Image (cartoon, grey):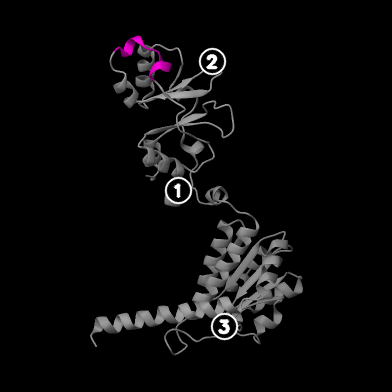
Amino acid sequence: MTDTEAFLRTARQVVTDEARALEVLADGLDEHFAQAVQLILQASGRIIISGIGKSGHIGHKIAATLASTGTPAYFVHPAEASHGDLGMVSKGDVVLAISNSGEAPELANLLAFTRRFGIPLIGLSSKPESTLMKQADVHLLIPSLGEACGYGMVPSISTTLTLAMGDALAIALMKYRNFKPEDFRAFHPGGKLGAQLSTVQDLMHKGDALPLVSVGTPMSDALIEISRKGFGVAGVVDPQGQVVGIITDGDLRRHMEGLLGKTAEQVMTQNPTTIPPGALAEEAVAIMNDRKITSLFVVEEGSDRQALGVLHIHDCLRVGLG
């Protein structure tokens, strides 16, 4: 067997072992998981996650996932808790303590603190008879299936299961709270994810920037408006201010003969495609790509089609969409 074959064999064994362990975890979920979710939902404070070593690293990620999906949470290092950080834990909070063995000595002071002050404690461990699980009000038990190294030395299967349990908690809470993409965006305003969750109203131009002409506007004036606003189009509005048409490059080419003697209404494309302000910008990009257009006027759904703004494909490209 070559080195490459040996490396791939080991890698596939690790991934396969972890995948099988996840199936065991899923099959074993019971009312204790539901109790943990209910306990967190009832909390008036925050969810405090704690753990040491690899459990601590996983705990950091669980806390971050909870916080970003609508469940206020943060990580408290158990050693630091013994040196003053216990003051970060208070009535109304819920503590989620993580230890695969359930016997991490660094957790002792935190566990004692929760018992002394009646702070609900969720234990996450693979050992049901451990100190942690005996102290906990709610038990999240992960199956004890060894580790992928085969010697029980390298946290791998156990950390994968712990991470999956944390993800399951976060998403169960998120779905119960009806946490939507627009809520998620509030916690992720930066980077590619922030761009993907941008709404049309975040990017649209409005007010004096809108390229609008009335139905009776001479095309000579409409061309000035198109040029002055710089979007390559003009929206056409009726006497009530409703968007009834759009003038594009294609409309200008189709009406080239005698163009300056016509009005906006004679040249426009009627009933243009529009988009509501609350739609995701990605949806706007999909519409523009599908219809091979570069601008969308923004109107409120079910309204009288008053123009609230205009969105150009370049606005979306600038934030990384498209």
Distance in Å between CA atoms under marks 2 and 1: 37 Å
Q: Position of residue 50 (x, y in %)?
A: 59, 71
- Residue pictured at 45% horizontal, 24% vertical: 245
Q: Quadrant of residue 40?
A: bottom right
Kind of residue at disc 3: Pro
Question: Which element carries disc 3, helix, strand or loop?
Answer: loop
Q: Which residue matches tag 2?
A: 239
Q: Magenta stretch?
A: 258-267
Q: Label 1 amino acid?
A: Gln
> Is most of the magenta stretch helix, strand or loop?
helix
Contact, CB < 8 Å: mark 3 with mark 1? no
The extreme left residue here reads 2
Describe residue 76's horizontal placement relative to residue 229 as left or right: right
Structural distance between the alpha carbons of marks 3 and 1: 37 Å
Looking at the image, tell me whether mark 3 or mark 1 is earlier in sequence order: 3
Total labels: the figure holds: 3
Residue 265 at what x, y percent from top left?
Answer: 43, 17
The C terminus lies in quadrant: top left
Most foreground residue, 78 or 249:
249
- The residue carrying pointer 1 sits among few (fewer than 14), some (14 to 19) or many (20 or more) residues within 10 Å by Cα, namely many
Task: Kindly identify which residue carries mark 3.
Answer: 143
Q: Quadrant of residue 282?
A: top left
In the rendered structure, the answer to whether residue 275 lies left or right of residue 101 reads left
